[in-house]
Image: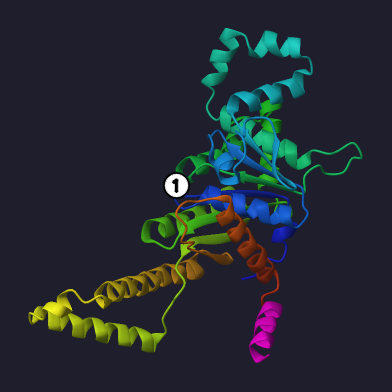
Amino acid sequence: MSSPDLYNRRFFLFSGKGGVGKTTLAAAFALSCARQGERTLLMELNVKGKISTLFGAGEVDHEIREVDDNLFAVNVTPAAAMREYALMILKIKLVYRAVFENRIVSSFLKVIPGLNELVMLGKAYYHVNETDEAGRPKWDKIIVDAPATGHGIFFLKIPSVITSLVKSGLMFEEAQRILDLLQDPERTAINLVTLAEDMPVNETLELARVVREEMGVPIGVVLANAVYRPLFDEAQVAHLNEAHAALQAAADAGDAQAQTHPAAGFLEAARFRNARVAMQQEYLDLLREQADAPMIEVPFYFHDRMSFATIDEIAAHLSRELPALANPAEDAADRSSSSAG
């Protein structure tokens, strides 16, 4: 399945189960866009320190700041988004303070279900449509690191819930504009991040179904994170298993040298790695069969900790893989030509 217009879209959301590397891949994708000369805005939603840590930047807060060439970041909090939204409506700060900083009004706003999510989505909507002094789009790409799966589904459903319950007024109009953006395949894509493991894959397949059937949000790609590259072919695996079996048999027979043989650790590690590759492959095949979306495998990077260097590597990987989704036949021909050469 190809995705010819993915890079031509402007608004991207990254969603997935917690702990699968969603923020990392959102940051890497944003960096890959910025490296292509596109003015890119990466948006965190009410979290603290993730983007700052990944880019080695100072604290990213509700003020937009540049974290790399062409790449800007912001941490959107409900309070800051509400303030910006209210000021856009009321225009005058004194009126804003009189209304929204009133204790009674503030307490009332806190208990309106979904309002926080709506104003944070509203900020993203604003930046998608934001223009510069010449009337041109201010941002080429807006990338949102959405909440993890459970809250993420609620977050994305809020506009449709509001438009189904409220049929007129300012809140309805805002929700309808946001919903139109989310469901627009020319502008928007949601990228689903997963690990090639049982629970993350099953949650991703369910998320893909909900996003497509219940929300009508277009899916861009499925990103399978931390995939182990195969190191051994079938003949080498057979030799590993034979060597391990022979060493184990000698150890079981009481051979002291076999019990402490330096190759034992290597054989165990090699067999574990091969088993891990095989296990992941089963889940990758399941994603290909059932996700109904293009998929990119992101390799496992053996680094002590996540750093900008790793983000940079992943960004380069995505820059190579994403164009191939748009032109699979052309990419296959290039690979064939390279092999022949």
Label 1 sits on residue:
18
Q: Is residue 224 above or below residue 60?
A: below
Q: Residue at x 31, y 83 (%)?
A: 240
Extreme-right residue of the structure: 134
What element does badge 1 sit on? loop
> Percent x, y for residue 31?
66, 52
Residue 107, percent across and down?
A: 54, 14
Picture coordinates of residue 134 (x, y %)? 92, 40
Is 250 in front, or is 117? 250
Magenta residues? 329-341
Label 1 Cα neighbours within 10 Å, binned few <14 / some 14-19 / many ≥20: some
In this view of the protein, can residue 242 be seen by the observer?
Answer: yes
Tell me the quarter of the picture where residue 180 sits: top right
Q: How many marks can you see? A: 1
Tell whether 17 sits left or right of 327: left
Which residue is rendered at x = 47% and y = 46% of the image? 149
* Vertical order, 328 against 317 (above or below): below
In front of the other: 16 or 312: 312
Q: How is the image coloured?
A: rainbow
Name the residue at the bottom extreme.
Answer: 340
Any magenta on residue 338? Answer: yes
Residue 156 appearing in the image: no
From the viewer's perspective, is 55 left or right of 234?
A: right
Give me the residue at 64% from left, 30% from top: 62
Name the quarter where the C terminus is drawn. bottom right
Q: For residue 258, which quarter of the picture? A: bottom left
Name the outermost residue toward the left: 254
| Towards the viewer: 102 or 280 | 280
Residue closest to the eye, 261 or 151: 261
Identify whether 309 is placed above or below 44.
below
Is 122 contained in the magenta span?
A: no
Label 1 is placed on what type of residue? Answer: Gly
